[in-house]
Image (cartoon, rainbow, N blue to C red):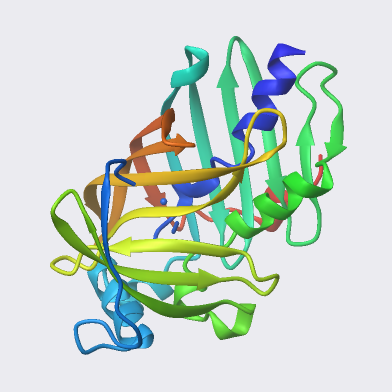
């Protein structure tokens, strides 16, 4: 059952696709919330600056698919592996994970979330709660370029000081009322961290924070090449990208159940 447990644990790690793939520094917080506008801006204005910081609306809209390859360390479990994540706009996602000599696949084809059972090699439907999380992670740049079209909205919660630095707090809300808190650097308008619920290895909801760092440019688009996930304030998962590729011609059939 060990590999199967790892497979479930990785289900919520799809944030490497963002972006925005929409891709958190832990410490003691000094809270400084303000209502309405932040730095004299609306949520739409902050979102537009986030888009420009990543490369601009035109460049992001030109991306039809994204492939990110890299390695990871599951800190709490002492395991290492390789992972390639594939995303096709607006909401197709596939993750191929190699760990302990086993390859695991998890995917969403726009209708069905499925996975390959690492013990039996058979294709199975994801458990319902895991599918809900995976489907939300499947959105690529559409989540920020055309949020209304996909039932996603943004609102400002004000400002928050983290380790003596102030960040803009933007709330992303999905159609099912699931929320992701985004902490945006007011100087660069890149995402510093996100905070939301996620699934742990026992398929239980837990508080998760993700720190994004080492932004690099690929074809004029900035992507975080390093990501650290904390569960309940404990480092759990570290991903380091080695390559980001855009528009490789991924077919929809690549995401469908095998």
Q: Nearer the viewer, residue 121 or 203?
A: 203
| Residue 219 visible in the picture | no
- Residue 135 placement (x, y as % from top left): 68, 56
- Relative to 62, residue 104 above or below: above
The reply, left or right, for residue 186 in relation to residue 10 is left
- Relative to 224, residue 136 above or below: below
- Residue 221 placement (x, y as % from top left): 28, 61
Disc tally is: 0
Q: Nearer the viewer, residue 228 or 52?
A: 228
Residue drawn at x 58%, y 28% as measured from the top left: 97
- Residue 122 placement (x, y as % from top left): 86, 27
Residue drawn at x 73%, y 61% as measured from the top left: 110
Residue drawn at x 37%, y 83% as measured from the top left: 43
| Residue 19 visible in the picture | yes
Residue drawn at x 83%, y 48% as measured from the top left: 128
Quadrant assignment for the N terminus = top right
The reply, left or right, for residue 160 in relation to residue 138 is left
Report which quarter residue 99 is drawn in. Answer: top right
Q: Nearer the viewer, residue 114 or 134?
A: 134
The reply, left or right, for residue 74 in relation to residue 251 is left
Quadrant assignment for the C terminus = top right
- Relative to 142, residue 242 above or below: above
Report which quarter residue 225 is drawn in. Answer: top left
- Relative to 38, residue 201 above or below: above
- Residue 120 placement (x, y as % from top left): 85, 18
């Amino acid at each position: 059952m060990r590999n199967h447990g790892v497979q479930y644990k990785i289900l919520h790690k799809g944030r490497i696709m963002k972006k925005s793939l929409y891709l958190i520094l832990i410490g003691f917080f000094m809270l400084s919330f303000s209502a309405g506008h932040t730095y004299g801006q609306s949520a739409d204005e902050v979102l537009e600056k986030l888009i420009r910081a990543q490369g601009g609306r035109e460049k992001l809209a030109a991306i039809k698919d994204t492939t990110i390859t890299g390695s990871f360390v599951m800190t709490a479990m002492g395991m290492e592996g390789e992972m390639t994540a594939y995303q096709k706009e607006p909401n197709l996602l596939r993750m191929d994970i190699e760990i302990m000599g086993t390859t695991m696949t998890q995917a969403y084809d726009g209708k069905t979330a499925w996975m390959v059972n690492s013990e039996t090699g058979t294709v199975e439907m994801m458990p319902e709660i895991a599918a809900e999380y995976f489907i939300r992670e499947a959105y690529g740049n559409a989540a920020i370029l055309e949020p209304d079209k996909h039932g996603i909205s943004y609102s400002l919660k004000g400002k928050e000081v983290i380790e003596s630095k102030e960040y803009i707090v933007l709330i992303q809300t999905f159609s099912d009322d699931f929320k992701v808190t985004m902490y945006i650097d007011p100087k660069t308008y890149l995402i510093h961290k996100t905070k939301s619920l996620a699934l742990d290895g026992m398929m239980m909801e837990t508080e998760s924070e993700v720190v994004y760092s080492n932004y690099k440019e690929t074809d004029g688009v900035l992507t975080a090449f390093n990501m650290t996930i904390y569960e309940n304030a404990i480092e759990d998962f570290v991903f380091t990208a080695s390559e980001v590729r855009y528009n490789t011609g991924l077919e929809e059939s690549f995401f469908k159940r095998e």
